[in-house]
Image (tube, rainbow, N blue to C red):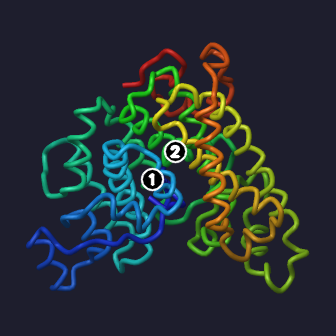
Amino acid sequence: MSEQHTARNLRGNGFAASGFAESGFAESRAEGSHWHPSVGEQLFGAIDPESVLKRCGRTFYAASRVLPADVRHDLAVLYAFCRVVDDCADLAADSPLGPSATHELLAEIESCLHGTSTRSPIVCSFRELAKSKGVPLMYAFELIEGVRSDLGRVRVKTSEELVRYAFRVASTVGLMMCRILEVDSEGDPFAVDLGIGMQLTNIARDVAEDAANDRVYVPAEWVDHATLLDSVRAAHSAPEATRPVQHAVEQMLSLADEYYESAELGMHFLPARVRGGIRSAAWNYRAIGAVVRRDPALALQRRASTSGLGKLVRTGTAVWASVLESLPLGPADRHDTALHAALAPLGLRPVTAGTEAG
């Protein structure tokens, strides 16, 4: 999942792995199979989840350093699982067989989740973690559906469709994280909001990169998709022509802020020992959006980023703010249920305060 996808996801780029644990898979690769080495090695190889987190999720790894060792390991297993699911989307572009290669890998992941296959050590580790922590596997399957929607050409039409996509590829990760952290289910709607906010930040940051992969997540109701694609191509030579897309990016970030602000209201539901780490991840992601907001044209030219020093300062501030945080500010029903109106078509059990989604 891209530091971009995880928690893209969380949608992410690239996966390092440590060799094949499955001899049959290695043989098929040697014979010129369509299997993608990096994703395949991650899926079938014997890997250290924390090394995956350190190498592929810099923002989350930085935040995780303030978490207890046992929690950090469990979250690393979750991250490694989500990351390999997420990276399957990139396989469609890299493999000569396109989406069919990804569908095969996703089907294998689903088989491991169902317990009908044990080929993937990382998926089996996640399944055992989910069993021990009471993580509803429905969230893992929703994540997979979100990745499937990334295959091939993507054109998001409405803001509601955008929010549903963000829920599938990001909020599901937050909900699984809540069970691992043993968060009261009243905190679930706020976890959903944090995932959506982070994913909208990813999309605002990666407009050009996604367009190059024939994926447009900025809703057509905000900007004509043909205009967006033309703007990306002309971003360096005619930046003044990108104004409509810049406005759409700003609209994306404003929507993200609504979800971040709601998520902040629910931080007190997190156990004290992990609150600082989660808050620092949220603040560091939101800071990426602030960089893009200062220069929206940046999203059409290159990926925005924040400095290492800035991340360190925000992490320290977030931890200190969490130490000083008082008791809950009010009842859980302060959550604005209108923020989740777009999720109704998914047919899931409502994720509302006091309701355990399962």
Kind of element beneath mark 2: helix
Closer to the camera, 22 or 53?
53
Tell me which corner region of the image, top left, top right, bottom left or bottom right, holds residue 247.
Answer: bottom right
The amino acid on which the numbered mark 1 sits, given as a three-letter code, is Arg
Q: Is residue 127 left or right of residue 84?
A: left
Q: Is the Cβ of the residue at disc 2 closer than 8 Å to that at disc 1?
A: yes
* Residue visible at 60% across and 35% down in the picture: 322
Mark 1 neighbour density, 10 Å: few (under 14) some (14–19) many (20 or more): few
Query: Does residue 287 appear in the picture of this structure?
Result: yes
Tell me which corner region of the image, top left, top right, bottom left or bottom right, holds residue 224.
Answer: bottom right
Q: Position of residue 271 (x, y in %)?
A: 47, 29
The amino acid on which the numbered mark 2 sits, given as a three-letter code, is Gly
Mark 2 neighbour density, 10 Å: few (under 14) some (14–19) many (20 or more): many
* Residue visible at 67% across and 61% down in the picture: 310
* Residue visible at 43% across and 64% down in the picture: 89
Q: Position of residue 29 (x, y in %)?
A: 19, 80
- Name the residue tied to disc 2: 277
Quadrant where the C terminus lies?
top left
Q: Position of residue 188 (x, y in %)?
A: 50, 28
- Name the residue tied to disc 1: 65
Q: Which mark sits nearer the N-terminus, 2 or 1? A: 1
Number of marks: 2
Residue at the right extreme, as displayed: 240
